[in-house]
Amino acid sequence: MLWCFLRTWGFPLPGGLAADPLHVQGDRLVTESPLGLVSGSSDDGEFLRRLYLAIVGRIPSVGETRVFLDDKSPTKRAAVVDRLMGTPAYVRRMTNVLDVMLSERRGDGEVKRGEWEAFLKRSIESNKPWNVLASEILGADAVDAKQRGRAKFLMDRGVEVNQMTREVGRMFFGVDLQCAQCHNHPLIDDYLQKDYYGIYAFLNRTYLFKPDKKKPGVLAERPGGGVAFKSVFTGDAGVSRPRLLGERQIDEPAIAAGKEYKVKPDKKKKNLRPVPTYNRREQLAKLVLGGNNRFFARNMANRLWALVMGRGLVEPLDLHHSDNPPSHPELLNLLSEQFVAMKFDVRGFLRELVLTRTFARGSSLPADLVARSARAGQLLGPVVAADKKLAAEVESADKRVEAAFVAEGKANEPVVALAKTLKPANDKVAAEKKKHDPAAKALAACRQEAPGKSRRWVCRWLRAPAGARGGGEVARR
């Protein structure tokens, strides 16, 4: 689509296109997709049930359904969307969605579930932008008791740098870099070891500060700690400063010796949390707040699409890479761009998604497509039968090959047993040979070098038993 490229590169759009809301633009891309086939529209009952499940996490009551079905207004679908999004049920639903996504149903730890859920609930109630919410989570330190809940994401990972690195990549940028920790990913060319350690470098100075076991722990930061890595496959080595995916390493200030801390460690005040002059994790939070990283926007746009549509444009949700492209690439580009343009407004973005004709499509195949599918099934019958026959033949051949291997193994068992006895025998021969080697060498030497009688005497002496090697006795033989 030409207009998609124009929008992407910042050129003005043709008249009318710029004014189209996101749900209209999105539907256009779906219907014009090379994938083609779309089902018909859902009826009001099916739409209402689907909407309730997506937005408030339950099905509508009989009374709610009757009111909606009796409403003859052409804008009743948009009206019920707006009404539901203004209810406490929407807040509960989205609190649960974010809890499952970010905390993955973890229980109490350093941060209690109640504190975490209260933080999420307040954020949803105020419609906090996603970039702000993510920044607060990634920059949390748990020092302020009222804001302690936001630190659960990091603390629940034990403040362990490798686990935090993987989870930050998965949850906030849509990439699972776990296999790039020790080497470039063996199956995904896009996932490089330097990408893993770019995120790692934001987090490796963070640690749990808990000098008093009776008091809640907080997050602290060391002033130093470089990042070096080496591939276990190739031996290639490197160092990394903090870097987000697709971006360059960030510039960092030079800190003079003795100026590393704003609040220095104090042995006399063990409960005083040290505060460095420069905090790398704060830089991560600031970059996320800026919202300029395309992986960050694409990840959440795809996750919200999956929430209401039942499946992401990229699946699995945390495996964005060039060998796993979106089902509708232009659509995901549009959603990402518009999510940023909407200033990461989750409620507004979800509203656009559930107003699409795509969301309102029926779950049944069109009648003509059912008929065509039945006819295609008849035509494919012989092909399917041949495929099953071939599969059976392959399975039979595999079994015969396996049986032949087993028979060969049994036939070789006597040979294997004999081979096992040969080694001890050979070892014994070698030991005996080694024991007699000095005498054999001396005998050979005397035969070659001792002339006349002396030679005969030496040879007799060597052949004589050890106890009978008296000079006279040997000489008389």
Image (tube, grey):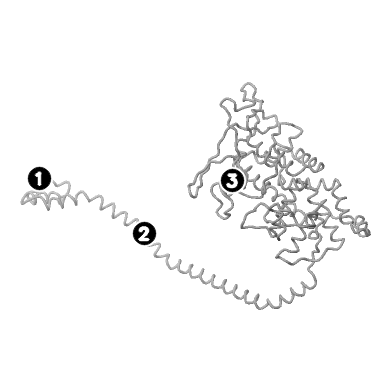
- Number of residues whose C-alpha sits closer than 10 Å to that of mark 2, classed few (under 14), some (14–19) or many (20 or more): few
Badge 1 element = helix
Viewer-side residue, 226 vs 16: 16
- Mark 3 or mark 2: which is in front? 3
Question: How far is the residue under mark 3 from the one under mark 2?
Answer: 54 Å
Badge 2 element = helix
Drawn side of residue 22 relative to residue 211, left or right: right
- Mark 1 or mark 3: which is in front? 3
Question: What is the number of the mark on residue 421?
Answer: 2
Q: What residue is drawn where x is 59% and y is 74%?
A: 390
- Number of residues whose C-alpha sits closer than 10 Å to that of mark 1, classed few (under 14), some (14–19) or many (20 or more): few
- Mark 2 or mark 1: which is in front? 2
Q: Quadrant of the N terminus?
A: bottom right
Residue 28 x/y as whole percent: 77, 61
- Which residue bears the numbered disc 3? 196
- Which residue bears the numbered disc 1? 471
Residue type, label 3: Tyr
Image quadrant assignment for residue 138: top right
